[in-house]
Amino acid sequence: MLTNRINREVLTELSSQQSRIDQNVYRVLRDLRINTVKPTRRGKRGGKRKQKKSDDCSNSLTDYSVSESDTVNNNKELKSNFIKLGLWNSQSVKNKTTSVHELILESDVDALFIFETWLREDGDQSKIAALLPDGYKIIHIPRIGKIGGGLGVIYVKDLVLDQFKVPLHFSSFEVLCCVISCGKKTLRFVCIYRPPPSKNNNATDKLFVLEFTKLCDVLDEMKESTVILGDFNIHYDSKENYLTKKIQKILDEHDFKQYVTCATHHSGHIIDWVLARDESFIYNMEVADKQVSDHFFITFDVDFERPVAPSVEITFRDIKNINIDDFVLELNQSINLEPPFTLDSSQLLDSLHTVLTSLLDKHAPLKSKIIRKRPNTPWFSIEIAEARKNRHSAERSWRKLKSETNRHIFKSARNNTNKLIDKTKSEHYINHINDNKQNPKVLFSTLNYLLGKPQDVVLPRGSDSEVANNFGNYFIEKISKIRLELSPTGTDECLDRSYDGNTFASFHKVTESELKDIILSSKPTSCELDKIPTRFLLLILDNLLPVLTVIVNSSLNCGVVPDCFKQAVIKPLLKKPSMNPEVLKNYRPVSNLPFLSKVLEKVVKKTS
């Protein structure tokens, strides 16, 4: 038997040799994921948001090398309470509302700055409503007079973000300025979209250099730290380019540094910039190709405390579980309608309110509850959750393998998820509208939500007492100014004229049947001044009709409106959603009267 002996030197020599497989074979192995190491099930103690992250600059089909020294604080451990910001050129959000909606939720950004929104000043409210996840708001500036362009920022409602303006007009680029505040810390953001120069916009490179220099000069005068974000349509990586050199010189003169260090566009160039003077507050810059537009999705964290939804204490009564029979029985025992009536209409109404409040406290006592508002997505389903999971898995595979096959799989999974969300939302709201055909309040609320009309009352910042006092003083002062501006008038000539027509001496009394018809034909609205909800009043209306008729006729007979009917809840409403909510003159006062006060008005109109 023959044996081959291999000594130590031969084995050592073999270990140093490297055999390479054919490139085509390697690509097949890679696409089939044969040559990859399968992930383990080991967890991560710090949680997803506390992991150390690296600059994700190789997410496109082409790899771009980035030097370690150019990364932005990516070795610092990310705190879970940092604000996360994003910027992205959407190339029109109007045709990709679901994609933008999903991008915001997936990336978990607190504010997303968007360039080229293509939104109009009016007429795109329904598109905006579809864009915004629950709990988010938007500020946007459209391009005036032409299609395209436009800037916007979508941000969580609890983030203190305000718009401000610079005292300059720019022709070569669009600009949106806002400031984020957190306690004593403030950070200004200047968002820029510079369209490529053309005959249509009359913009030139020379004009942009001039106007951008003026903008930087203005920003130098501001005390707060400033970040300039934007799509400059200038290849920052082309260091020998004439325009790049010009802009770099301006940045150096104003101590601005560019923190995006890898390609931000499918062309392979850096055209989306993040400029700041001090990198100490910017962490974890990431650039990812989301395959939604030609531009990549950029995110970074800011050393600001992340906003937390405030807890609110609410009080309520469990009206639905009141035993109507027991309530009516005690109501009849408490109301005395035996003549003669020695009380006037105000006293009668106060007595009725006392009885109703006492019975409500017994059958449906006030309860308090602390709630924290959370995102509301009634259309969400298990199928959507599974589709999102498949989309995430497909995206991770594509980013790891960087193959064309996996890219198509990811895009297909993303499109399927978007279609499923659109279909599920449509079916949910169709069923919701059909189920509430007889409930006008729910119908109007749903339609207003879908059409993007304001649902929540927007008020200036401050405590309840401060806001109320500020509004009260403002409207009182406004009325005083109007009175001062009115010129004094002389004697009205009409007072000297005689009247030969029929006289109106008194109101006609109303019957229980007439009063019931007026009440049932009225819109069942309620306000804070109503002692019982209007819908509950309608349930016990037959038992209340005798006393209500007495009160109304007493008011008509004396010609006096009960004191509590003269009170109203004043609610300031913002004239336009785009107006600054911190400016009091942008509001108009709307008064809400008690339900029975409106009923008395209709009775007077009918009987006069």
Image: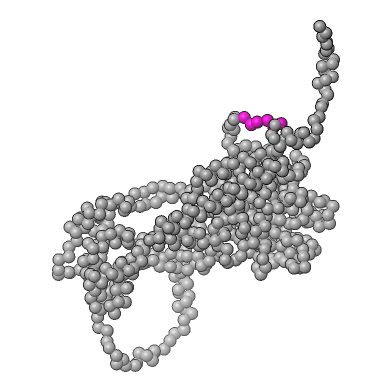
Q: Could you say which quadrant of the image residue 117 lies in?
A: bottom right
Give the residue at x 57% y 60%. Answer: 127
Give percent across and percent down for residue 97.
59, 55
Q: Quadrant of residue 30?
A: top right
Q: Is residue 36 magenta?
A: yes
Q: Is residue 147 left or right of residue 584?
A: right
State which quarter of the image contains the C terminus: bottom left
In the rendered image, the residue lying farthest to the front is 1
Residue nearest the viewer, comparing 575 with 400: 400
* Residue 284 point in image, percent of width and height: 66, 43
Residue positioned most to the top:
1
Decide if residue 463 is in sight here: no
Q: Position of residue 172 (x, y in %)?
A: 73, 64
Tell me if 524 is positioned left or right of 391 in this view: left
Tell me which residue sits at (65%, 37%) in the image. 52
Q: Is residue 69 magenta?
A: no
**Magenta part, dominant SS:** loop
For image coordinates 50% across by 46% down, the residue present is 381
Magenta part of the chain: 35-40
Q: Is residue 391 left or right of residue 521?
A: right
Front residue of this view, candidates 165 and 506: 506
Q: Is residue 186 left or right of residue 364?
A: right
